[in-house]
Amino acid sequence: MRINIKVTNLIMTEGMKNYVQEKMDMLDKYLGNTQVLNCDVEIGKTTNHHHKGDIFRAEVNLSLTGELLRVEKVEDDLYKAIDKVKEHLAQAIKKYKEKKK
């Protein structure tokens, strides 16, 4: 699956890019032979003025045939936000496939 990654208020590192790619590739087993038209991933800091640490945001827009699956999560750790997005997107894909049947 080809993934478009957008980063907001952060500097993209190779580690971040590989982590996002690895997590999104795990979704292939749920997709099966479902055609993915587009996969947009946006990660970043929500704002720069929090007093108690940074707040990170991860969002995925997955365009399937006739459907757009969108999941967004906010966490205090970027990698935790990416993990939660992957988990919730897997559930959304399962629900989409059940609906198609």
Image (cartoon, helix red, strand yellow):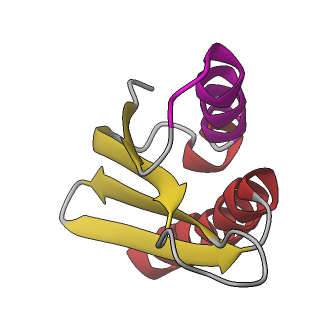
In reply to whether residue 16 is colored magenta, the answer given is: yes
Magenta span: 11-26
Name the quadrant of the N terminus. top left
Residue 34 found in image quarter: top left
Indicate left or right for 37 with 43 as reference.
Answer: left
Q: Is residue 65 above or below residue 93?
A: above
Return the residue found at the far left.
66
Is residue 101 in view? no
Q: Does residue 94 appear in the picture of this structure?
A: yes
39 vs 11, left or right, is left
Q: Relative to 3, does residue 75 appear above or below in the rendering?
A: below
Q: Is residue 89 magenta?
A: no
Dominant SS of magenta comes to: helix
User: Residue sitting at 57 percent across and 40 percent down?
Assistant: 32
Which residue is found at the position 47% from the left and 72% from the top? 47
Residue 39, by quadrant, is: top left
Q: Is residue 56 left or right of residue 38?
A: right
Find residue 24 and report its horizontal and vertical position in percent.
61, 39
Q: Nearer the viewer, residue 20 or 57?
A: 57
The percent position of residue 98, horizontal first and vertical second, equals 55, 76
Residue at the top extreme, as displayed: 14
Q: Position of residue 83 (x, y in %)?
A: 77, 57
Left or right of 65 on screen, residue 15: right
Q: Residue at position x 63%, y 36% from top?
A: 20
**Residue 35, percent from left and from top:** 33, 40
In this view, 37 is above or below 73: above
Residue drawn at the location 38% of the way across and 69% of the way down: 69
| Circle count | 0
Q: Nearer the viewer, residue 77 or 58?
A: 77
